[in-house]
Image (spheres, rainbow, N blue to C red):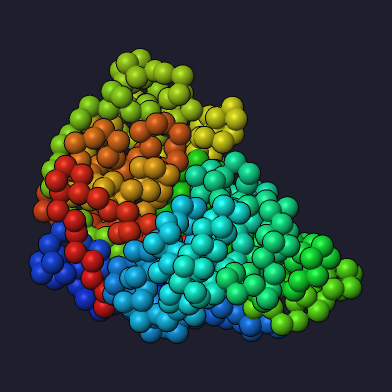
């Protein structure tokens, strides 16, 4: 494949035109408008197959439950259902969507911190595999609902195991400071209070979820060890063995597969976005470790008939989705407020700030400071004092060959894809690689400031807070004009499911092939 972003059979450049599952991007926009989200059924399936391989490295039964919150479009849920895996939902609404897509009760698990009695009753009526109880209070609610219906509720207990993962603070879910789950003591109390013979609550599992986009594979070993520790404690203190353990989701996606912009993202965020490992390798190692721990504790029997659940969302759907967007406006602006400066140019004096000093760019031709080869950072300036928020490009190590750029002006491109359809680009400064959809074969070397259409200063494709979690500029072909189509890649997870019609904007079509 000529381009790093290409994925054979799904995302391909043919004669300069981006093809998605064999369909030319401009044809899709002509038919369905812009912006538009396009998903590949085949890619979803191959992502699922990758996860199902975990079964080959563990000697217990695996249950893969797609985390519907990542994308709960009806057609996506149908594609997941066709692949033969199960589903995790977070509300009565998602539960209903899962049922509509063909999932049966025994394929559904139900998470969430604030379930209503009506939602709990729906879950019990459909005899779902597990309602994942978030607190002792919620267990009482479930008990009341099962009494009312005269049916048994299948329940699992969500624990807060105090595991710090390496993801964004907003995506951490296993710390005491996060809002999820009950303490292990609470789980033991629950087991004592609701006996196996109890007709109302069948508590048959425990659950933890350590966060999303976990870049450190060791977190999974810790998670599985924590689950085993709780199994053991429950056995010793209540005499009960459980039927399943649930490790949650969080397997990462490599958003920097095309790493041309990686040098312009701060090291911490870069590590997070470029995380990549095989889930089967990681779970295989974690499983081996936990069996050793169990053997030492003379409690291997606790793992013998256990079922292992996982709840992946992002790793199934993120790279199966593309957002096509159209440039609606273009303008040139003086570089006054930019962090980039040419030593000796008149801009240096006017834009000097504490922050900008670390991004000085040296001119390849100092005598002609209006043109330079961008970028070439001064080595002594390559990171912030904390070494966490600056880019850290070694001079001369950029993987992109960049052309010359007129420094006096920078070009802004205003697209029709704003944070109302890509919310995490604003909330978590999430990076979505941007390419040209009809000039995909041309060098992507010209820097542009890119922004969306919303009446909100935060609706930009760079980190307006100045922490370099996103690159300041996007590199695209030269001389882009309004009307040209661009493609934001890896936009399948936590985008469509969070869209809202801010500014009265019509929501994009979501297609799946
Ligand atoms: C409980 C639970 N399970 C699964 C997931 C899915 O995580 P991911 O999409 O990172 O796989 C989430 C999302 O954070 C979650 O909160």
The quadrant of the picture occupied by the C terminus is: bottom left
Asked if residue 337 can be seen in this view, the reply is yes
- Residue at 31%, 24% (x, y): give it: 337
Q: Position of residue 445 (x, y in %)?
A: 32, 49
- Camera-side residue of 474 and 414: 414
- Residue at 32%, 16% (x, y): give it: 350
Looking at the rendering, which quadrant does residue 70 occupy?
A: bottom left
- Camera-side residue of 210 and 143: 143
Q: Residue furthest top?
A: 349
Q: Is residue 166 above or below residue 76?
A: above
- Residue at 46%, 49% (x, y): give it: 262
- Residue at 48%, 57% (x, y): give it: 112
Left or right of residue 510: residue 43: right
Left or right of residue 89: residue 293: right
- Camera-side residue of 259 and 398: 259
Q: Is residue 175 above or below residue 239?
A: above
The quadrant of the picture occupied by the N terminus is: bottom left
Q: Position of residue 295 (x, y in %)?
A: 86, 73
Q: Position of residue 281 (x, y in %)?
A: 65, 72
Q: Position of residue 455 (x, y in %)?
A: 19, 36
Q: Is residue 265 above or below residue 245?
A: above
Asked if residue 449 can be seen in this view, the reply is no
Looking at the rendering, which quadrant does residue 302 occupy?
A: bottom right
- Camera-side residue of 135 and 304: 135
Q: Is residue 150 above or below residue 318?
A: below
Left or right of residue 103: residue 141: right
Total marks shown come to 0
């Amino acid at each position: 494949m000529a381009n790093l972003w290409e994925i054979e059979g799904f995302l391909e450049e043919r004669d300069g035109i981006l093809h998605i599952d064999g369909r030319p991007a401009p044809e899709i926009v002509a038919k369905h408008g812009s912006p538009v989200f396009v998903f590949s059924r085949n890619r979803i399936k191959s992502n699922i197959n990758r996860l199902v391989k975990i079964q080959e490295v563990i000697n217990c039964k695996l249950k893969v439950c797609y985390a519907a919150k990542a994308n709960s479009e009806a057609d996506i849920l149908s594609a997941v259902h066709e692949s033969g895996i199960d589903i995790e939902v977070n509300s009565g609404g998602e539960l209903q969507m899962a049922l509509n897509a063909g999932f049966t009760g025994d394929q559904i698990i139900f998470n969430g911190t604030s379930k209503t009695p009506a939602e709990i009753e729906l879950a019990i009526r459909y005899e779902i595999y597990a309602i994942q109880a978030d607190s002792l209070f919620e267990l009482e609610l479930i008990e009341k609902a099962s009494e009312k219906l005269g049916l048994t509720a299948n329940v699992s207990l969500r624990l807060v195991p105090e595991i710090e993962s390496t993801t964004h603070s907003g995506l951490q879910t296993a710390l005491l400071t996060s809002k999820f789950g009950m303490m292990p003591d609470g789980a033991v109390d629950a087991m004592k209070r609701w006996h196996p013979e109890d007709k109302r609550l069948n508590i048959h599992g425990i659950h933890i979820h350590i966060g999303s986009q976990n870049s450190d594979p060791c977190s999974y070993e810790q998670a599985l060890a924590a689950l085993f520790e709780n199994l053991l404690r429950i056995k010793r203190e209540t005499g009960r063995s459980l039927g399943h353990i649930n490790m949650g989701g969080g397997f990462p996606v490599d958003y920097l597969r095309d790493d041309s912009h990686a040098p312009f993202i701060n090291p911490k965020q870069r590590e997070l976005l470029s995380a990549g490992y095989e889930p089967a390798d990681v779970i295989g190692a974690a499983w081996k470790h936990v069996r050793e721990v169990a053997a030492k504790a003379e409690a291997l029997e606790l793992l013998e008939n256990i079922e292992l659940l996982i709840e992946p969302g992002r790793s199934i759907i993120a790279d199966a989705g593309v957002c096509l967007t159209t440039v609606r406006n273009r303008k040139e602006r003086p570089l006054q407020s930019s962090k980039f400066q040419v030593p000796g140019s008149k801009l240096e004096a006017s834009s000097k700030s504490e922050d900008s000093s670390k991004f000085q760019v040296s001119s390849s031709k100092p005598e002609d400071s209006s043109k330079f080869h961008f970028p070439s950072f001064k080595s002594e300036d390559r990171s912030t004092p904390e070494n966490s928020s600056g880019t850290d490009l070694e001079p001369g190590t950029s993987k992109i060959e960049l052309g010359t750029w007129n420094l006096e002006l920078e070009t802004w491109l205003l697209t029709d894809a704003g944070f109302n359809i890509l919310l995490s680009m604003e909330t978590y400064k999430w990076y979505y690689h941007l390419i040209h959809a009809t000039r995909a074969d041309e060098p992507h070397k010209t820097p542009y400031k890119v922004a969306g259409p919303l009446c909100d200063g935060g609706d930009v494709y760079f980190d307006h807070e100045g922490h370099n979690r996103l690159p300041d500029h996007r590199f695209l072909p030269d001389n882009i004009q309004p009307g040209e189509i661009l493609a934001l890649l890896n936009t399948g997870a936590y985008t469509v499911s969070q869209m809202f019609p801010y500014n009265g904007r019509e929501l994009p079509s979501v297609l799946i092939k």
